[in-house]
Amino acid sequence: MTDAIIISIFVIVLYNRLSMEQIYLRHFLFGLLFPSLFLTSCKDEEYPIPNVPVNVSLNLDLPSYTPLNSPGGSVYVEGGSRGIVVYRNFDEFIALDRHSTYDSEKECAIVQVNADNPFELIDTCSGSAYSIISGVVLVGPAQYGLRRYNAYWDGAYTVTIYN
C-alpha cells in the first residue's frame, strides 16, 4: 500500500509541474496511477474451509429425513468438509457446511443447531454463532460465514445438494 502512496505523490508532483501543452502526458500518468492502486491493494485471507465436491440426494420419504417434510425442520447429512446441515425454510432448502470457520483446523470446529434457538448454528468450540438461513456470522469470534451449497427440491420427494 505504501508503494501506491509514493507513486500517487510522484504523479501529483509531476502533474502540477506540467504545462498545458503536455496534456497527453497527463493522461498517460493518470493511466499509470489508477492501475497501480488496484494492483497494490490488500489481499484478503483465503477462506478457511476447503472446497470439496458435493453431490448428495435426499429422499424425503425416508424416516431419517422426516424433519424436512415441514418448514423449520433440519437434519445432518454426510458430505462437505465435516458434514452438512440441511434446513427447510418453507419452499426452500438451505444446505450449509458444518465446518466452523473459526479455528477451522481444530477437530471440535463443527456447528450444530442451537437447542434454545433453532434459527442459529453454534460452534461449541469457539462460541461463534451463525444464521441457519444464510450462514452469516451472528456472534464472533468467527469472521467468515459458513460455506453454502446449492439445494434443489423437485417439489415432491427429492432434495439434491451440490456445488
Image (cartoon, rainbow, N blue to C red):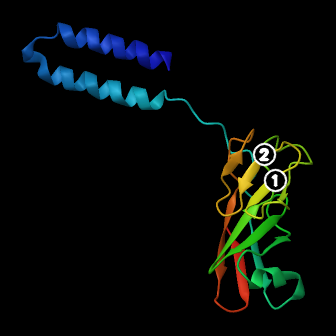
Label 2 secondary element: loop
Give percent across and percent down for residue 163: 67, 67
Which residue is found at the position 35% from the left and 12% from the top? 9
Give percent across and percent down for residue 118: 77, 64
- The picture quadrant where one finds residue 98 is bottom right
Which amino acid, by three-letter code, is at mark 1? Ile
Which residue is found at the position 76% from the left and 85% from the top? 69
74 versus 70 height, above or below:
above
Label 1 secondary element: strand
26 versus 66 height, above or below:
above
Q: How many marks?
A: 2
Which amino acid, by three-letter code, is at mark 2? Ser
* Discs 2, 1 touching: Cβ within 8 Å: yes
49 versus 162 height, above or below:
above
Tell me the number on the disc at residue 122: 1
The one nearer the camera, 141 or 9, is 141
Tell me the number on the disc at residue 97: none
> What residue did someone put label 2 on?
128
The one nearer the camera, 42 or 159, is 159
